[in-house]
Amino acid sequence: MRFPKLFFTIIVLTVLTVFTSHFAFGQSVSDSELKAKEDEIKQLEAKVAELQNQGKSLSLQISVMNNQIKLTELRIESTKQLIAKLGEDVGILSGKIDSLEGRLKEVSAILLNRIVVSYKVGNVDPMQMLFTSNGFSDFVSQAKYIEVAQDNDRKLLFELEQTKINYNNQKDILKTKQAQQEQLQAQMVKLSADLAQQKQDKERLLAVTKNDEKRYSDLLAKARSEFEAIQGIIAGRGKETEVGSVSEGQKIASIISGASCNSGGTHLHFIVSNNGIAQNPFGYLKSGIDFENCSGSSCGSSDGDSFAPTGSWNWPIEPKIRMNQGYGSTWATRNDPIIRQIYSFHNGIDIAGSSLDVKAVKAGTLFRGSYAGSNGCNLRYVRVHHSDGGLDTFYLHINYL
């Protein structure tokens, strides 16, 4: 008889469905290990925040950097653990899905065979069954068997459908975990880059300060004073004297050679202002100029600030232009160990040229000015007020003519 075989098949399928619905993923990287790593990261984050609020000494800054480096290393370790755990889960899921797929094919074949048998049994004439039976009790037994078999066929079909649903659910889980793996891999790339940058920042700070607290304090004070002066000048708080009208291209000043008040070396800080609000100078200066971009980690490096002039003005200095810092959020405001502690937005551009001569980029009225900073030095500048609206250009770190 086929009944025992059918009953056995249903039991196998039911067990298979329950098993595939509740199997556990591999746990070689335990949840407790991941939790411990998360707790360690939180503790270190709190320590970094505490150190950052304690002041600006060199030793504290280096301590902050050391802890930030350690924090990033911990995050990398944690991410590696998560990737490994997901890899185990993906491997197990893939194996279970392959097994389910095979079992689905097998059970589908059994079900198809049962449908054929049921169809044949269903077409048997009851009278024929009665005459071919060994008595009335045998006839009743055959009729009950057919009813049970048909009922079990329906159960088999239901169980097959549930197994298909579980199979599809496992495939969805697999896709989700694979997507999580890709996200974590991308996160690993960023964390590795952050770690390399943090180590470079520490080396740069030690190189600039020579691991000397006084030098560090002096550099901070100088950068803070320059920022204060530049903000004060563009806000109209400098002391100015009107000189008179100047024409476009007329020499109006000369760049100070070497270090000077709030300047570490030869350069012109050029600002364009409209009604007291700094504008991007590249929107006014003309393109096609010969230049060297030294605004990044080194001259010509790919991490330098954007050099993309689109205007019509001639440049205030003679090319070849050397750009030391661009406008806005610059490489220096993000990476320089001193500058980034003082300001995050550069309101002009720092440039040098083939000569020290400074020229008016546009006709207007010339003013000579100075700003007394908090460190006691007077930062000299000239301003040209242009006739069109509230447009002004500022030229800092210069000598008057």
Image (cartoon, grey):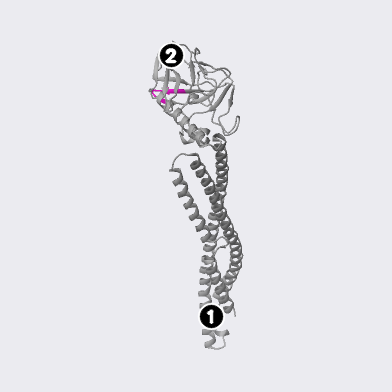
Magenta span: chief secondary structure: strand
- Residue 364: numbered disc: 2
Within the magenta stretch, is there residue 162?
A: no
Residue kind at label 1, given as amino acid type:
Tyr
Foreground pick, 85 / 370: 370
Residue ID at (56%, 70%): 115
In 3D space, how far apart are the residues under numbered discs 2 and 1 (Cα atoms)?
A: 108 Å
The magenta segment is: 271-277
Left or right, 110 with respect to 222, comes to right
- List x then y, in percent, for residue 327: 49, 28
Q: Residues within 10 Å of mark 1 (few under 14, many from 20)?
A: some
- On screen, 48 above or below 129? above
The residue labelled by disc 1 is 145
**Identity, as a three-letter code, of the amino acid under mark 2:** Gly
Q: Which mark is residue 170?
A: none
- Upstream in the sequence, badge 2 or badge 1? 1
x, y percent for residue 206: 56, 38
x then y, percent, for residue 88: 59, 59
- Relative vertical location of residue 258 with respect to residue 44 in this rendering, above or below: above
For label 2, the SS is: strand
